[in-house]
Amino acid sequence: MTTASVATAGWFRRPTSKRGVWSWLTTVDHKRIGILYGATAILFFVIGGVEALFIRIQLARPEGKVLSAHQYNELFTMHGLTMIFLVVMPLGAAFFNYMMPIMIGARDVAFPRLNAFSYWVFLFGGIFLYSSFFMNQAPDGGWFGYAPLSVRLPGHGMTFYSLGLIILGISSTVAAVNFLTTIINMRAPGMSLMRMPVFVWMTFVVQFLLVFALPILTVALFQMFFDRSLGTNFFSSANGTSDPVLWQHLFWLFGHPEVYVLILPAMGIVSEVLPVFARKPLFGYPVVVFSGIAIGFMGWGVWAHHMFAVGLGPVANTAFALSTMFIAVPTGVKIFNWMATLWGGSIRFASPMLFSLGMIAMFTIGGLSGVTHAIVPHDYQQTDTYYVVAHFHYVLFGGAIFGLFSGLYYWWPKITGKLLNEKIGKLHFWLMIVGFNLTFAPFHILGLQGMVRRTYQYPKGYGFDFWNMVSTIGSFTIAASLLVFFYNVRKTRKEGRIAGNDPWDARTLEWTTTSPPPEYNFEEIPVVHALDEFWHRKYVEDKEGRIVPVPSGAQEPAGEHVTGTYAAHGEGHGIHMPSQSYMPLVAATGMPLVGWGLAFRQYWLAIIGGLIVIGGLYAWALEPAAEE
Amino acid sequence: MATVEHRAPPAHQTSTGLDNAKIAMWAFLGSECLLFGALISTYLLYRNHGASGTPLPHEVYDIPFTSVSSFVLLMSSLTMVLALAAIQRGDHHGTRVWLLATALLGMTFVSGQVYEFTVFVREGFTVRSSPAGSAFFILTSFHGAHVTVGILMLLSLATMSLRGQLPTERSTTVEYVGLYWHFVDIVWIVIFTVVYLVPATK
């Protein structure tokens, strides 16, 4: 009897280790989860990058023989899936996790265990997708998975695609619900919506997009999965009564909001970095916020511009051409606001700033080529050519990845306590931006010359040879720039300069706490009085209207902090933080088992996986609130 | 009722004054709207897409039967409200009775759906027979799966209540499960109207 009850108590005991592997496996700390997201995303960035290098080696010369057609299909499909779902989205999530709660003055997210669950489901979803390689069954129908091809492709590749993206969708939906609740409900006293940093605002918009866009993709993926496994007739039927365009509608109704899911976090980061390094407040903060919200709404009305060549008819094409041109307006507004922020500022060209400026320049190029797609006859000419590939690499690499690297350089000292080396950082930037343009600018020319995308070879004598070779050289330059980044990380780890709380003289709340922040983020929950709260604590206007630092010792006026239930005693003793838990990890391990079981029709495996998920969730609900 | 000394969790002052879990549940239900929206749209696109030799959905529907099972499901929303009212006034016996009644009504509905499916399949209208069949069966079985998840949550709540783990202070748990349950009911009203009642026109 006694032993049994002890065993039960042991099963339900909350883990407490603060160091070592178990502390990471059981963590519910939003900062650690953010680091896990970031590290995993960078690992996948390397994998997706190697896939891109293989593609570029194959295409360096006409009639390349390095890859077979099938291998090429697998590589470009997995490259796209990896970069979108396993790199840009989770890198954004890394910053949402780490920075957003601190920037709104919270101690953690609304549901810490759910947050850990999101990460583990993401990780296992990524492992599930990549396990297809080891079974020689990698997805080979493109990241867009156009039906009916995707339904009729032999092997298990597109089954892995549908199930893998469903698992990743669960992760993102759960995370989005969590972040939405956090931003709505966990803001520090005085942190009204219009005092939130732009990065938090963009996070907020992104979570709305995810919450509403992902279920549409989930439905389409289920329909694809049932078509492949159950023999349903959603996209492909023997007598031709199903409608393959349905897939495109559902996919792009998800897919276009998804584009803004990828770019808005980068826009948020740029809007944080520019004011700090131009030493001016963001120009037109409310306009930047509202244009972000406008993008969030208008993003739902432009999806058919991916389908101009499908034959929807002139009325639909015209309507979507107009809405697509309109959505360039709020995007353009942001770019002008950023330029006005720089105007007259005393600019410091530190590496975070360089990456932000690179983002603005490259994203503008990508945005302009995007507007050319909105013109329907123009799009007829460009569709399925490398011109489109050039466009979306300019917005997703030139926009999103440059923005995210800006965030890495900007917040690295906050996360690790050490400043990344500036000289090496600048070398990284210049190598990357040169390599990026060498790689992707030629695609514009190749596309207009008529080079078709998604094919594994091109014939001699079409004039494609030179620019393809340039592009391949560029892609290796990007790879070299990443090696420089990793060298910088390693060097900084060993001998980096200690950052202190506020190395950049920044404006937002995350810089008020230590680097790295304690588990509880703030000893006392800050009270917010203004936009750019931290700046206003550091600087005041003197009698002549000049900006002068607040005399030291007076930065934090007495009586300006909430004490109450979180009353801090010295070093955070008495602050109630959520307990660690095994259960998010346990529940998430069941997900890939369900996937493998369904893909290979080993239903016993799917049932075991399902029981692990359900059992994990029940144990989660029942485990004691805290280890006393 | 004995005064239970319970450790009050630290009074989290939220920005809106609402409970986190309530906001999360509403966000999740918002997401579910789009899930069912996509499924219902697929059905509307395909409801006349038959295949030769197999019936179209409107040729197999048994409206009186489905009306009865829809009524059963609607009544379960009433019992759900009664369960919430019971726990809010501290009537734990009543809570369990109404939770179990809700679960039972839900199970009746799901059983009716299973019966309906077997009849349709016998008449040649299956998930593979035509795009209309695929759209109908996947839509309604997704809904059925949602009802089943709801039943599991209700039974779990009833078990917790029996073991004394559902004190009046945790009545919000019943409230949030109730939100989910009412949502699933409302979705069924839409499905019943749009899928079954609105006549198919060529």
Image: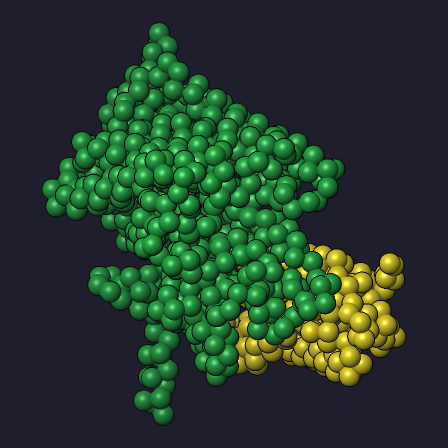
Left or right, A218 with reference to A48: right
Pick the front one: A337 or A157: A157
Q: Position of residue B121 (x, y in %)?
A: 75, 80
Residue closest to the far bottom:
A1
Pick the front one: A539 or A292: A292
A126 up-or-down from A479: above or below: below
A131 up-or-down from A60: above or below: below
Residue at horizontal 39 percent and vertical 43 percent from the top:
A460
Residue closest to the far front:
A461
The colour one sees for chain B in the rendered image is yellow
Q: Position of residue A409 (x, y in %)?
A: 28, 37
Left or right, A306 with reference to B49: left
Residue A250 visible: no
Q: Position of residue A84 (x, y in %)?
A: 44, 50
Q: How many marks?
A: 0
Q: Position of residue A554 (x, y in %)?
A: 28, 26
A457 up-or-down from B187: above or below: above
Residue closest to the far top:
A544
Residue at horizontal 21 percent and vertical 63 percent from the top:
A20
- Residue A553 appears in which quarter of the rendering? top left
B202 up-or-down from B87: above or below: above
Q: Which chain is green in the rendering?
A: A
Q: Quadrant of the N terminus of chain A?
A: bottom left
Residue at horizontal 45 percent and vertical 70 percent from the top:
A591
Residue at horizontal 72 percent and vertical 67 percent from the top:
A239
Residue closest to the far left:
A495
Pick the front one: B70 or A237: A237
Residue A308 visible: yes
What colouring method underlies this structural image?
Answer: by chain
Q: Quadrant of the C terminus of chain A?
A: bottom left
Pick the front one: B51 or A48: B51
